[in-house]
Structure formats: structure tokens, C-alpha cells
């Protein structure tokens, strides 16, 4: 496993990781290493050395590590035992490499300790070009590394289209642009370019077919690195990614991402059902190869991982056939991905007959422990943590649900389902038990007498069990006529109570309680209409009816029309922009326009996608800003 710190739920992302993992930083560090004259002493004033050497293994000339904290002397970092900085003068080093950015003051501080004739180099030699730095005065500001990866593909059968909005403009950003680099399947660079964003909070897209034509590329399957330059207020790059068929028109899927942090493990990967092939797209997020034997798949809870027996090159993409690695495993078995912090959240592809769908696994936390406070939450928090998801109209769709362990410490899941009609009436309750980690429960809502609405997974401790608040599930929807399938997955939160517990209810900005809504809904793609399944979940009683407004924005981000929507508490609805706004208004919004779902009175949760009358549709959870 890579010895790097990536994401901390309390502090957010680790900016040191982002600074070292950027593709241009990798090139800069390679040049820095090429200029080293050995022997080399590495001074680590900011605890960067271990991550530096994990992501960019140093040449053999780097043979000694020095620290100034006496408590750290004797610690092993990057395979070297830390020595006191006072021993540096006698080290015989010809180069002293200081593992720090903005290191001018540090150089001044240790100049008198340099061995005779030694040169000093710092990580400032590997900084990003000045034109890509959003906050020039502080290099390790998180806004300088608003980055993410996207699964990107154009192979004559399937294409991809990334859609988002310049939400940084809402925080005062000016002249926003994207620095983009497309990596091929073998990790080589196919193209590097920039794209200007609207001056206001307008929508934008990046279509793989247009990129392929622009650069004259052969068919490709790889990954797109995205760096938002000029960011203000928000260091997370959020987007929705459509994968659509450029051949028979039948395949369609949507995934959302705002998680740019590698994890040791991921969960929520389904085993193949009868007639299905499941591929895990493993994409190396770093400039260092993934060694053979590092990546593994395992049936959830089995603890018998099967390792990948080959290395994966820098930024390379490989397709792992789940059935080949875990023969005999079938839906509804679940699979755990062990990736050693080498990859950002992977995608998986399911093919059945002529239809393909893409979905994502989720980060499996390794830093959680059972919270004894959750079973004892007071009545003021009502049902506490809820995981809401839609039940699509039964006349057309099957809706299937499966709880998924999402932390290495989750040995059991004490859960039940509460089912609500669209008007907020609770129509069913089903205790699912204290499920073991290796359970294979999948519930088909054909067994529940409801045409449409939503369900909420909640904790229920009647048979014991533990909870940590990190409650997840997979949701699968199948068109009864066409056989097309879409699936999504997400986790629980506390919703719509003014009382708070720890960091819940969450807010898009500011401290909890987060009792407002800002959700992004793209418009149709010219062939299919977009939709959103909006849910008004409530842990405790809240306003009887939402005060939701669909705000239609044009390509420049200007608000051009509004449509009110009223959702009963614990109710749901499906909204269609082409029904909420007339054709002339939608035409004025343009192909890069979008709908912002706003509500100042409650926190809604939603799932969005595209749908046509021929049996194709997509669905994933929405994102907000």
C-alpha cells in the first residue's frame, strides 16, 4: 500500500498529496531528481518525505534522512532511519534536498549546516507553472489543486460526455479555465489542452467525440485529468459523466464524481448476474507503477483476496474481468476492491446482450469505529441517519436494493427499510435484520405494494449490532421491456432536523444543520430528456411541504425562468425540465444550460439521468454546490 495520506473526513483533502500527485508535479520531480549529485541528504521539515518517496521513488543516491524534531529521530520514513539535523554537516552529502515547498526561509535557516560545497535543492523546483496557480502567495493552498480524474472513452461503440457548471463563479472566481490532460490506456499522453469556462456560473461540457476529432485520435479508453485554474471558494471538481452509445443507441449510463482521493479499499462492486459480464476499470492515478500483487478482488467478508499478477503502469488503464478473477461468484454476492491507494474511485462496466452500463464503486473507510452514541440518539433526532433512494414507476421499472458494507470495521449492518408513497405516506416497513458483513441480500420492490415513491434505509437495533453512520447501499433499476439497467450507490445522512449530531445534517456551505438545497440537473442531450427523482427525507418532522424551485439557467449562468415544485415531507417526485419549461424557454437556455434545484427551507436528495421512449435510461445521485 502506498504510504500516503489522502483524505481526512474532518480536515478534507490532504493538499500535500494533491501537490505531489499532479501529473506536472511528476514531471517536475523527475527533472529535480535528474539534477541530483550524490550522495544526497534528504531533509524533511514538513513530514512530506514519506509521500514524496512513495509517489516518486528517489534514485539510489538519496541515502540519508534528516529531521529537526528530536522525537522523530530514529523513525523510519521511506526506508531510511531519521537522523538529527545537527549531524548533517558531517554527512558528506554533495546535495541537500529539502522536502518542502515555499522553502526559502527553511534554506536560510540551515545554510550554516550544509556540508562543504553541497548544493541545496527544494521541491519548489517542481512547482506547477505560475499560470496554473490560483493562489500565488501560498503554494500549498487547496485552491491551487482543484483537480479530479474522469473515466474517458471513445472507441467507436461508446463515447463519454462530462457535464458540470462553473460554480466557482458563485464564490467570486474570475476567468476560470480547465487544464486538461488525456491519458491513453497504456498511460501515455494523448492530448493536453485548456478550456475556458463561462464568466458566470454557466454550464459546460467536454465530449470525447469532439476531443477525438479535434486531436485526430484513434479509438481510446483512458482517463482525463482535470485541473480547475482560478478556483475560489471550492477545491472540489464535481461533474456528471454520461457514457452513451455511438453505435446501436441502446447503451446509456451516468456517473457522478466529486471524490478525487485514492483509497486502500473500495466496495459496492456487484458480482455478475446470469448473462452478464462485469469489468472493473482500474486506472492508475499516479506516475509510479502499481506493483504486481498489489491490487486484489475479494468476495465481501471472505478475506480470501485474489491478487492481480501483473503491474499497472503510470496513469495506465486495465480492465479486470471479475469472473476471471473470482470464478463462480454471482449476483447478489458483493465484491471488495483492494487497490492500495493507487487509484481514484474506479468505474465498473456491466454488459448484458447489446447493452452496457457504467457505475462506480465507493470509498471503503478504514478509519471508522462503531459509535456507541448512534443507538442512543435522542427522540429530537427522530430516525437519525437515513439513506433515501427512489422507487421508480413499477409499471415500467423493477427497483432492486442491496445494503453494502463500506468500512473495513463494519462486521454487521443492523438495518430496516421504511417505504413511502410519493405523497409522504409511510406504506411499509421491513426489518432486514442484523446483516453479517458477507450477506447477499438483495430486495426486489415488486414484493412491496407501491407503484412509485421512495424508500429509506435506517438503523434498527432490535437484534443488536453496531453503527458508525457510514451506511451505504446499491440501487438497481431495470426497464421491464428493454432490459436496460442503471444503478447507483450512496450513503446515509441525517436529514431535515434543526437538532444536530456531530457533523450532521450536512450543508453545502457552512456548519450543520444543512437545511437548504442546491442540486445540479443537466438538460437533455438532444436525443433524450433529462429528469430528476427528488426526495424530501426527514429524520424528524419538518415543514409539511417543500418550497422547491427549479431555476433554469442559460449557458452563461443567467437565470432565465423558474418553476415551483411542492414535495410533501417524506415524499418524492420526478421532475422533467421539458415539462417544467416550454420549448422556447429551453431553446433559449441552450445545450449548455442547466437547472438548479433550489430550496431554502429543507435539504432534498436527488438522483438524475436521461431517459427515452426506446428503453434506454441512466441514473446516478445528484451533486450540489
Image (tube, rainbow, N blue to C red):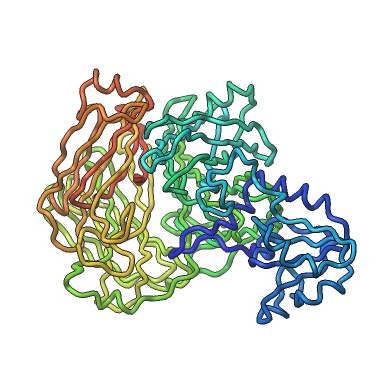
Residue under the image location 48 percent in, 62 percent down? 364
Q: Position of residue 612 (x, y in %)?
A: 32, 28
Quarter of the image where the N terminus is located: bottom right
Q: Position of residue 49 (x, y in %)?
A: 69, 64
Answer left or right for 603 relative to 359: left
Residue under the image location 42 percent in, 69 percent down? 437
**Closer to us: 364 or 131:** 131
Q: Is residue 109 above or below residue 275?
A: below
Residue under the image location 86 percent in, 61 percent down? 118
Quarter of the image where the C terminus is located: top left
**Closer to us: 540 or 515:** 515
**Is there any visible trace of residue 436 in the rendered image?**
yes
**In the picture, residue 428 is in which quadrant?**
bottom left
**In the picture, residue 385 is in which quadrant?**
bottom left
Q: Position of residue 121 (x, y in %)?
A: 77, 56
**Is there any visible trace of residue 354 in the rendered image?**
no
Q: Position of residue 619 (x, y in %)?
A: 35, 41
Answer left or right for 232 relative to 528: right
Q: Is residue 466 above or below residue 135?
A: below
Residue under the image location 68 percent in, 65 percent down? 50
Amino acid at each position: 500500500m502506498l504510504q500516503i495520506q489522502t483524505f481526512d473526513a474532518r480536515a478534507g483533502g490532504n493538499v500535500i498529496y494533491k501537490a505531489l500527485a499532479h501529473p506536472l508535479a511528476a514531471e517536475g520531480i523527475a527533472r529535480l531528481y535528474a539534477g541530483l549529485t550524490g550522495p544526497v541528504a534528504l531533509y524533511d521539515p514538513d513530514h512530506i518525505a514519506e509521500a514524496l518517496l512513495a509517489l516518486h521513488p528517489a534514485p539510489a543516491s538519496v541515502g540519508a534522512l534528516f529531521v529537526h524534531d528530536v522525537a522523530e529521530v530514529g523513525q523510519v520514513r521511506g526506508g531510511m532511519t531519521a537522523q538529527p539535523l545537527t549531524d548533517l554537516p558531517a554527512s558528506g552529502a554533495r546535495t541537500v534536498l529539502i522536502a518542502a515547498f515555499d522553502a526559502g526561509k527553511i534554506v536560510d535557516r540551515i545554510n550554516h549546516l550544509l556540508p562543504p560545497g553541497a548544493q541545496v535543492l527544494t521541491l519548489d523546483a517542481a512547482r506547477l507553472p505560475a499560470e496554473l496557480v490560483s493562489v500565488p502567495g501560498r503554494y500549498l493552498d487547496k485552491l491551487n489543486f482543484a483537480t479530479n480524474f474522469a473515466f474517458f472513452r471513445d472507441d467507436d461503440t461508446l463515447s463519454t460526455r462530462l457535464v458540470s457548471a462553473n460554480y466557482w463563479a458563485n464564490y467570486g472566481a474570475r476567468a476560470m479555465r480547465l487544464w486538461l490532460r488525456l491519458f491513453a490506456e497504456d498511460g501515455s499522453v494523448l492530448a493536453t489542452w485548456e478550456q475556458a469556462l463561462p464568466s458566470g456560473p454557466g454550464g459546460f461540457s467536454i465530449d470525447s467525440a469532439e476531443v477525438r476529432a479535434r486531436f485526430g485520435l484513434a479509438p481510446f479508453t483512458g482517463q482525463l485529468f482535470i485541473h480547475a485554474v482560478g478556483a475560489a471558494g471550492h477545491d472540489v471538481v464535481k461533474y456528471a459523466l454520461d457514457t452513451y452509445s455511438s453505435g446501436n443507441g441502446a447503451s446509456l449510463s451516468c456517473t457522478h464524481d466529486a471524490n478525487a482521493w485514492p483509497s486502500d479499499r473500495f466496495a459496492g462492486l456487484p458480482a455478475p448476474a446470469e448473462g452478464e459480464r462485469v469489468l472493473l476499470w482500474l486506472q492508475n492515478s499516479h506516475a509510479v507503477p502499481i506493483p504486481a500483487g498489489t491490487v486484489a478482488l475479494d468476495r465481501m467478508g471472505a478475506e480470501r483476496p485474489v491478487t492481480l499478477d501483473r503491474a499497472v503502469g503510470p496513469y495506465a488503464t486495465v480492465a479486470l474481468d471479475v469472473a476471471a478473477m473470482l470464478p463462480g461468484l454471482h449476483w447478489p454476492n458483493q465484491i471488495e476492491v483492494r487497490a492500495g491507494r493507487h487509484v481514484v474511485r474506479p468505474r465498473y462496466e456491466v454488459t448484458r446482450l447489446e447493452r452496457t452500463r457504467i457505475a462506480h464503486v465507493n470509498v471503503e473507510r478504514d478509519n471508522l469505529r462503531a459509535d456507541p452514541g448512534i443507538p442512543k440518539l435522542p427522540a429530537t433526532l427522530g430516525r437519525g441517519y437515513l439513506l433515501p433512494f427512489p422507487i421508480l414507476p413499477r409499471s415500467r421499472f423493477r427497483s432492486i436494493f442491496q445494503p453494502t458494507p463500506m468500512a473495513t470495521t463494519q462486521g454487521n449492518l443492523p438495518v430496516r427499510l421504511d417505504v413511502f408513497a410519493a405523497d409522504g405516506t409511510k406504506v411499509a416497513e421491513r426489518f432486514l435484520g442484523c446483516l453479517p458483513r458477507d450477506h447477499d441480500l438483495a430486495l426486489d420492490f415488486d414484493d412491496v405494494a407501491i407503484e412509485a415513491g421512495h424508500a429509506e434505509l435506517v438503523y434498527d437495533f432490535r437484534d443488536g449490532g453496531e453503527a458508525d453512520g457510514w451506511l451505504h447501499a446499491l440501487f438497481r433499476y431495470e426497464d421491464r421491456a428493454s432490459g436496460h439497467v442503471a444503478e447507483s450507490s450512496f450513503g446515509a445522512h441525517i436529514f431535515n432536523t434543526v437538532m444536530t449530531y456531530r457533523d450532521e445534517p450536512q450543508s453545502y456551505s457552512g456548519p450543520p444543520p444543512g437545511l437548504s438545497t442546491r442540486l445540479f440537473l443537466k438538460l437533455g442531450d438532444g436525443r433524450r430528456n433529462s429528469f430528476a427523482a427528488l426526495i424530501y427525507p426527514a429524520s424528524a418532522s419538518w415543514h409539511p411541504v417543500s418550497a422547491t424551485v427549479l431555476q433554469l439557467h442559460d449557458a452563461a449562468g443567467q437565470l432565465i425562468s423558474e418553476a415551483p415544485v411542492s414535495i410533501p415531507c417524506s415524499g418524492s417526485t420526478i421532475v422533467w425540465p421539458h415539462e417544467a419549461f416550454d420549448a422556447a424557454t429551453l431553446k433559449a437556455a441552450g445545450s449548455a444550460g442547466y437547472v438548479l434545484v433550489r430550496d431554502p427551507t429543507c435539504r432534498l436528495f436527488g438522483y438524475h439521468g436521461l431517459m427515452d421512449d426506446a428503453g434506454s435510461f441512466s441514473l446516478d445521485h445528484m451533486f450540489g454546490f
